[in-house]
Structure formats: C-alpha cells, structure tokens
Amino acid sequence: MKGRMKMSDRKFNLVTDPWIKVIEKGTNQEKAVSLIKLFQNAHDYRDLAGEMRSQDLAILRFLLAILTTVYSRFNANNEPYDWLTIDENTMQVSQSVDEDDYDQEDENDLLDTWKTLYQNGNGHFTGIVTKYLKRYEDHFCLFGEHPFYQVTESEYNQFVPTKKQIKAGKGPGTVAVKQINRQISESANTPAVFSPKAGEFKNDIKLDEFVRWLITYQNFTGVTDKTKIKTTEKFSVSRGWLYQLNSVYAAGNTIFQTLMLNLVLMRKGKMYYPQKPVWEYESVEDYVNKRKEQQIPDNIAEIYTSWSRILHIDWHQGERPTIFSAGIPMFDSQDAFIEPMTIWRIDKKSNRYKPAVKWLRSLGTAMWRNFGQYVNVNGTDDMHEPGIVEWLNLLKNKGIIPYNSHLTLAAATLVSDGNATSQAPAAEVYDDMHINADVLFDKRNPNYWPKRIEDTIELTQIIGKDFWQFAMKIGQIRNSDAAPFANRLSSKFYESLNEPFKAWLAHLTNHDDREREIELWKETLRKLVLDAASQVIQASSPRDIRGLVDDKGIVNNIFTANNHLRYKLQVDLKIERKG
C-alpha cells in the first residue's frame, strides 16, 4: 500500500482479503489468510500468529462469534434447526424461542452439530459459514457505508456533544495508531521507550495489521481518552471487556481444534437466546442505544464483539489514519456468567461474582498455582468454574470427547499499569497447563484427583514459604534489605518449579496410584529446594559463613539456615530420608 489513494479507491474486506496471521502446519511458515480461507482450511493451520498473544485471543473470540452465531442456527448439514424460525434473507432467528418449547432434544441437536463438526475428519467448517459471511460481507469491509468496527463521521457527530464533533476532518478525542497498537500503547503525552518501532514510524501501519489492532483495541482499551457519547445519565469510560478478565481458554493442536473446543453452543439447563454479534444490529444507533442500557448481553456472540468505543477513522491523510474515539457505557461485570473465558472471584462487598483480574503484583504466579480457580475442587457454593471448563466437562460427560483427551487450558492476559487515569498496558502474560480430561473431570470419590492436586499445590506453597524463610535469614545475615532479597529468591525458586510441576500434572491419568504420584512430586520438590539452597550456599561470602550471634549467644549463619531448611522439608514433606 504505497502512495496516496482516494477513499473511493480503497477496498479491504475481512471476508476475502488476507489479514489473519497463522502458522501453516505443513511448513511451519507464517502466512495471512481471509476469513473464508481460515474457516475452509482451519485444520491446516497450527495456531494464530499475530503480533501478541492477547491479540490472538481477541481475534479468536471474534472468529468464535461468527461460528457461534452460525451453528446456533444451522446444523452441520447447513440446515436450520427445526425448532427455530430463520429468516432466509438475514439468516437470523426471526421468532423468539419460548422457554417452555426449548427442551433437552433441542440441546441435543446443538450437541450433535458440535459432535459432527468435530468428528467429520476434514478439519474444516461447512459451507453455511461461507454463505453467512457472504451475506454480511458489507459489514466486514474496512471502508464503505458500514465500515467494520467503526462509525461514519455523521454517526460519530450524532453521538458526541457538539464541542467534541468532527469538523473539516479535525476535532478532539483522537487516538493515534501508536496508541491502538498494544505493542506500543503510546499516548501523545507519554512516549513508549521500549517500542518495536522508532518514533517517526510508530504511526505507520498496513491495512491487514490495522484490522488486527482494531479488533484488539476494542477488547483491550485503556481509559486515557476522555471523549464520551451523550447520555442522560453520567458514566465513566471503561476498559475494554476482555481487558477486565483473567482469561482462560482451551488450546488445541490446530486452529480447527482450538475453535471447536471453545465453541460453546449451549449452556446446560439454560434458555436458548439468539446470538447477536455487533454487525447484526439494524444500525449503529440501535447498538449504541442498547449499550446505554448497560445490560449484560444474554449471548456469547454479543459479548465477544462488544465495543468499548465508537471509532471513526479518517483516511484522508494518506497512509496514517486519524482515529476519533468516544467512550460508550459498559455493562456490569457482576454475575456475567455468559462470559465463558474468565475465572471468577467473590466480591466481598456485594457477595456476587466478578471476573478475576490479573495485576502486576501477581505476574509471576503461574496458572497451576491457582488450580482451584479453574475447577471446583471442594464442590462448594462459593466458587464458580469458568464457563469454558463447564463446557469441556459437559463434552466429556456426554462422551463427545474421549475421557482420556489431553486438554490444554491457556491464558493470554494484557495487564494494566494499575493507574486509574490511564490503565495503559504494562505487561503481557501467557501461560498454560496440560491435563487429561479424566483427571480434570474426575468423579468425586476419596481418590478425586482435583482435590489431591489442590492439596499437593498447597503443600508446594508451604515448601515455598520454607524456602522464603531460608532466604530471609540469609538476607538478615548479609545485613541487606531482607524482605526484597527473599522475595527475589522466592520468585526465582517458583520459576524453577513451573516446568517440573506442569510436566507432573500433564502425565497424570485416572488409573494412577494417587499416593505414589504425589510422593514422586514430593521427591522432585525436595530436590528442587535443595538445589536452590545449594546455589545460594555456593555464592556465600565470609560474612555468610561467619554469621550473626543472637542474644542467647547462638550463631546463625548460612549453614544453620540450610540445616533448618532441611529440617522443615523433612517435617512438611514427611519424607523419611536424610540428605
């Protein structure tokens, strides 16, 4: 895309033009594909390969919004479900489903569609997806009457106060390309020092990359922009919806598997609600008016395509677009269980569930250490499992996926700086854990694996405290700031646990002797602790060896600290051995 182009010359459509970056399975090479190509050849692609993992997650959810919409209306034979009334022109549900009429057989129809797609052996989606995309092709065009994920200038001016309106291509409330690019996230006031692009190039972007960041920005918006739409009641600009979640999703060996494992077509015992992605609204005005109500969406496609801003993009400046942004009201996150891809926590004030949030202070805490947030190990009422975990459990219980399926739960999270006035991205975290389905969804009995795993993690945390106390003593002997020193060593120690524990978790099966497997981990853990302590001892100084004498005349040095650590290991691990 070089040189200056007129608006009338500009064409870019997500349905037919390549913009989704993937890794080809056969060649391990990166390439860009269109929506149609991706859905037709999903099994040939190993993974999404965008600029960031969090971008890939935003695009994954966008793709799932399309699939959820289509297959909640049409079966694997491209036919409408006989209990739905589908408008032939719009391909939408034209008559609401009565709660009394929606029953187990209808749920089974949706599950049969999922099963047929997953087991068809072709690894691609059926022709109805292409037909749907062609029907709504004009809504996936980056330019035109219905610009993708944008509003026109007249629509923008209709929504914002007069003093915020665009006049002659100029106005307040702009964000630069370098701000929607979450690798840079640079505002006009705060330059990004560690940026992948130099200053004069930070606003340069190709159309395919711009589309990826456009979707990402609506999901991971901060709060630096202050322009808001007109409403009768005041509201605060909100972060993007996905930015508010401590995400969790299922990762497969191919894009087809990943899409299928996360394709939630029904919620057991819950009413059927028609899917409503943002592009199916009659007009932008209808969508914005709906958002003013601040109601939690009742369908997955709508929550996956939720906007945090109305954006008008002016391309008259050539290669560098001018982006006008205005905040719109965000729905409440409390008890928003329609969202499948988050872990939950109880809000102590309201006693209701809210999505858990990842903070900078918890960056080093791996997924496995919070195992109990992904599965209700104790079966208590004060814990709500992520919707995607409930869905996978349903598939396993129905025999749709094999009981010994190897599942990967993954998280891709953009973590904010914690500054209430900006909420700018400060770090990105990706993590995963592999586990057999029959272990994760073991039947409740005295050998219930999830409870034994959680108990093992709690024991590991106790040993982590033992090591922290050892490090604290060394810090005191060195007359340094002991707590930060201990925290640094503790963080490094937990990093050393991540891969061994994940490997232990991944190899567990439902046929294992629980006690034997747990003892094997305890042996591994003991060795890792002693290795970590040995590294500290090997770097000891004369002061460490000389130590300190306490009020009782007892010498505390690096060797007494190590001996005490060994004693604590023997007591806490209950391993009858010396070393």
Image: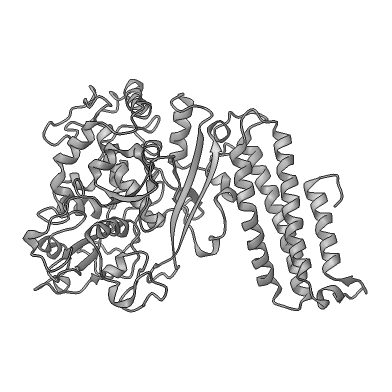
Residue 50 horizontal side relative to residue 438, left or right:
left
Image spot of residue 185 (x, y percent): 35, 68
Kindly tell me whether residue 183 is visible in this rendering: yes
Residue at 67% from the left image edge and 43% from the top image edge: 455
Give the residue at the far front of this rendering. 27
Nearer to us in this view, 544 or 344: 544
Figure colour scheme: one colour
Question: Is residue 350 positioned above or below 483 on the image?
Answer: above
Image spot of residue 261 (x, y percent): 41, 36
Residue at 85% from the left image edge and 73% from the top image edge: 545
Occupied quadrant, residue 520: top right
Residue 10 horizontal side relative to residue 38, left or right:
left
Image spot of residue 469 (x, y percent): 75, 63
Image spot of residue 483 (x, y percent): 68, 71
Nearer to us in this view, 172 or 238: 172
Kindly tell me whether residue 296 is visible in this rendering: no
Residue 180 horizontal side relative to residue 288, left or right:
right
Question: Is residue 116 positioned above or below 412 on the image?
Answer: above
Residue at 23% from the left image edge and 50% from the top image edge: 18
Question: Is residue 538 positioned above or below 61 on the image?
Answer: below
Occupied quadrant, residue 209: bottom left
Question: From the image, which quarter does the N terminus lie in?
Answer: bottom left
Residue 415 horizontal side relative to residue 266, left or right:
right
Residue at 67% from the left image edge and 65% from the top image edge: 489
